[in-house]
Amino acid sequence: MTQTMKQWQLHQFGIEQLKQVDVPVPTPGKNQLLVRVAAVSLNYRDKLVVEGELLAEKPLMPFVPTSDMAGEVAAVGKDVTKFRRGDRVSGNFWTQWIDGEPPAEMLRHGLSLGGPLPGMLAEYVLLDESVAVRVAATLTDEQAATLPVAALTAWFALIEMGQLKAGQAIVTQGTGGVSLFALQIARAFGAKAIITSRSAEKLARVKSLADCDTIDTTEYPDWAPKVLSLTAGRGADHIIENIGGENLGQSVAALATGGRIAQIGFLNGPDIILPAVPLMLRRAVIQGISVGHRRAFEQMTAAFEQKNIKPVVDQVYSFSEVPAAFRHLDRGPFGKVVIRVID
């Protein structure tokens, strides 16, 4: 095995500050895996971390960003029992959250991959055995790299917490990774899906991806009545709220009685604004979602394999094109932006 590897680092915040450097290949310690990274995918969170706008606890510099990857186990440390060399794995975003309720220390010191913990933008990374999740055999490395944050967020909102049922209706907002995963999960489990976007071109692409209804929010900025029309006046059982701000008022108005809003994104700002009375009359639930635990990741991986769900990858960049990949993310991709680490 080579003694050195390439890695992207930040010495100060800002996309333009990303630099590729050569560093020693790390050695796995007790219960650790050394993973040769095949592919990395980008999340909006990664952009905020790189720009220094998200983490209350700033990471130590130089810092390696990004949370999502898929790769192959190259070596194992002492006492590793679940994995061996050659296994394909990803890492769970919340390293402390294995199952059940999040541990109390996670709320105080959220040890997540890609900030504040070192991220995945390197040719080799170390993962604790307890964090690793096997990659579905039906997925390529590029597809598998998209699952740890965006897919698990959609899965946790709809399946783990929402208990989605066939015949229910969901609304998902935008055409980024979380939204398209929500669409695919909903359709795979027999639910009706409605997707909103300001882009007519992207909505046309959505229609070719899955059987669903679409709402152009440029044409219908007050989009809740369209949801009611598309659901025979009943409303949506689940809404994936990716925008936040005053958009939450539309989400409440579009809900069915007893419906759920999964608060995931905040593109319109960190504060949410909503009318209390409609929320109360609908007996609605608003639940914050922040990715999910390892057990849900494992169940999701099995379901993706069984139902042959294929992640939507907008574009794949080479490892030398990381800044360009972040610029693509900033423009708003259709699905996921992926970086191929191994040529």
Image: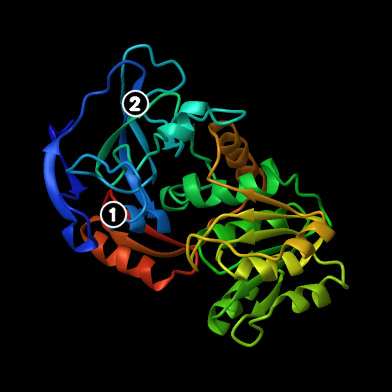
Comparing labels 1 and 2, the label whose residue is closer to the camera: 1
Give percent across and percent down for residue 138: 54, 46
Q: Percent position (x, y) of residue 47?
A: 34, 58
> With respect to residue 147, does 295 lie above or below?
above
Whether residue 205 can be seen here = yes
| Residue kind at label 2, given as amino acid type | Leu
Q: Residue at x 47, y 20 (%)?
A: 82
Q: Secondary structure at mark 2?
A: strand
Which residue is drawn at the image coordinates 33% and 45% (left, top)?
A: 38
| Towards the viewer: 289 or 87 | 289
Residue at the bottom extreme of this rendering: 219
Residue behind mark 2:
33
Q: Residues within 10 Å of mark 1 (few under 14, many from 20)?
A: some
- Whether 184 is drawn above or below 82: the answer is below
Q: Nearer the viewer, residue 212 or 99?
A: 99
Picture disc at residue 301: none
Residue positioned 55% across, 40% down in the render: 292
* Amino acid type at image mark 1: Gly
Q: Quadrant of the N terminus?
A: top left
State the mark number for residue 52. 1
Residue 132, percent from left and from top? 44, 31
- For the point 22% across and 55% down, the residue is 13
